[in-house]
Amino acid sequence: MKLDNSIILTFDVEDWFQVENLKKNISFSSWSERELRVEQNTLRLLDLLEGSPKAWGGDVCKRNEPLRATFFILGWVAERVPHLVREIVARGHEVASHGFYHNLCSEGSLQDLINDLSDSRKLLEDITGSPVHGYRAPSFSISPKVLSLIAECGYTYDSSYNSFAANTRYGRLELISNGCGIAVRVLPSFFELPVSNLEIAGHIIPMGGGGYFRLMPALLFKRAVKSILEKQGSYLFYMHPWEIDPQQPRVKNLPFSYRFRHYVNLDSAASKLVDFISSFGGCRFITCKDYIDMVAADTAQGPIR
């Protein structure tokens, strides 16, 4: 099956002050006053993915084939640095939506959510001049109703489901595999691409990325990903640009759990990502859209336009 040995790297492009764990300490009204670091961090990620030696102290991703990734971009960020959105596309990566204001999909009215879904997609399409196919909910706050709205707003795939139930912000979906690799065909032309986790004896171990990636020893994480690839053929990873930025401003008076989850191992995350990518040199690193197109081709549906 040509989907085998596929790794999908995804990056949620939001800045350090927009993270859910910091919302009680940083008001939305203060966002415009905060230091904007997302551009420099995303550019460093782009350099890192290309194997540029200028990225983070000489760390280089050793790749024989081009590496492509998907960047889920917050509309608020895209409005302020549209040239960054165009740079991501120019370097061969996919641009998708992360909503506009990083509001949880479980909060606010349905009309607010529809506006968020539609406005963020239109903004990115206006900036890039190309269709935007994918969406990821802030903090994986998905639900069956939200999934339906995402499809109704014109997206062709969602990547918001994280099966690790211990995080109460994560939404729940009942997904049944239908022979589409790790993708699940929800509607004839609409798919869910879940974040990859490891299941052991009925228990879900978070292995999709983010803080779990920063916290876990590199060797253990790579072994888990290898196991996922052996069982499922493909693997989907997520991360944020602020996670490779140990110099970001420190927020005071955070509860210990939030402080730990946000700041743990920021100084080693970039080199850890390089090591992870280099360790899976025999795999194909592709975008969410490319993966969906391969699924559609395998099931005789043709690429999603």
Image (cartoon, rainbow, N blue to C red):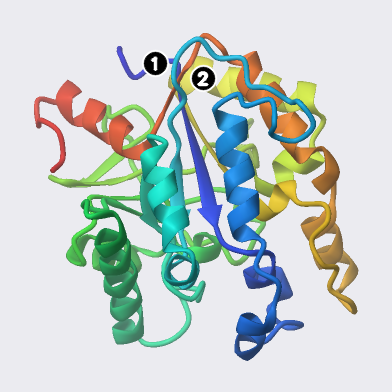
Query: In the rendering, at what x and y percent does residue 3 appear?
Result: 34, 19
**In terms of depth relative to the viewer, which is nearer, 155 or 28?**
28
User: On the image, which quarter does residue 69 sit in?
Assistant: top left
User: Which residue is label 1 attached to?
Assistant: 4
Q: Are marks 1 and 2 in contact (CB under 8 Å)?
A: yes
Mark yes or no: residue 174 visible: no
Q: Is residue 34 above or below residue 134?
A: below
Query: In the rendering, at what x and y percent does residue 15 appear?
Result: 62, 64
Query: In the rendering, at what x and y percent does residue 260 appear?
Result: 86, 58
Q: Is residue 297 left or right of residue 65?
A: left
**Which is more N-terminal, label 2 or label 1?**
1
**CA neighbours of label 2 inside 10 A, class few (<14), some (14 to 19), many (20+):** some
Q: Secondary structure at mark 2?
A: helix
User: Which residue is label 2 attached to?
Assistant: 229
**Could you tell me which quadrant the N terminus lies in?**
top left
Q: Is residue 193 above or below residue 155?
A: above
Mark 2 belongs to which amino acid? Answer: Leu
**Residue sitting at x 59%, y 66%:** 169
User: On the image, which quarter does residue 301 sit in?
Assistant: top left
**Residue sitting at x 27%, y 27%:** 179
Query: In the rendering, at what x and y percent does residue 42 appear?
Result: 58, 49
**In terms of depth relative to the viewer, which is nearer, 63 or 292?**
63
Mark yes or no: residue 286 visible: yes
**Residue sitting at x 32%, y 83%:** 110
How far apart are labels 1 and 2 at the CA level? 8 Å
**Residue sitting at x 43%, y 71%:** 79
Q: Secondary structure at mark 1?
A: loop
Mark 1 belongs to which amino acid? Answer: Asp
**In terms of depth relative to the viewer, which is nearer, 226 or 101?**
101
**CA neighbours of label 1 inside 10 A, class few (<14), some (14 to 19), many (20+):** some
